[in-house]
Amino acid sequence: MSKQLILIRHANARSGTLGLADFDRTLDSVGLKEAQEMAFRVRNRKLIPDLMVSSPAIRAFSTARIFAGIWDKEHHSIIEKQTLYEASIPKLLSVVNGLDNHASSAAIFGHNPEISALAGYLTVEGLYTMPTCGILVISFEVEAWNLVSKDLGTMLLFDYPGADVAQ
């Protein structure tokens, strides 16, 4: 048995210079298009996860809601985790390690630089810089989420808006 994790950086957001607190930044028109594009790409690859976990920051949760709609999932099924906002690798890993073992796959919606750092930590392929709405699919040959740790993951897919990735 294996586990599959999809790390998703939130889509493009409005600038923080518009007087909004960082937590309250919303998606802009580019971000709305990015989220739709990437949600369809994941769906077309039949990689829709069992669980969706998101940072509660507006830009991340809005990205998760767009994905949920395209994946035919209820918005209320998205699990909000405060620890995904401005989190360290140990805090992000604790979210992954705490996922429900009944789920063989999960998507985590988060922020840079943390989501890219987690991707580099979990895979042997190296470091990633995830652009807005970038996705990284990682496979783990483990039976339980609490066994996921450093360098145990294998990158299956790295994709982002505008990338020419073979379908």
Image: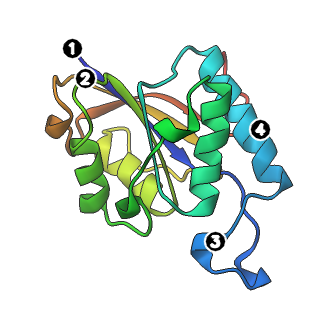
Amino acid marked by disc 3? Asp
Q: Is residue 40 left or right of residue 42?
A: right
Amino acid marked by disc 4? Gly
Q: Which residue is mark 1?
A: 1
Residue 162: which numbered mark, if any? Answer: 4
Q: Which residue is mark 3?
A: 24
Mark before the other along the chain sequence, 4 or 1: 1
Badge 4 crowding class, 10 Å Cα cut-off, few under 14, some 14 to 19, many 20 or more, is few
Foreground tag (1 vs 2):
2
Residue 102: which numbered mark, if any? Answer: 2
- Please tell me in which quadrant of the rendered image residue 84 appears: bottom left
Identified at 76% across, 67% down, the residue is 14
Badge 2 crowding class, 10 Å Cα cut-off, few under 14, some 14 to 19, many 20 or more, is few
- Separation (CA) of disc 4 from disc 1: 33 Å
Amino acid marked by disc 1? Met
Q: Mark 4 and 1 residues: CB-CB less than 8 Å, in contact?
A: no
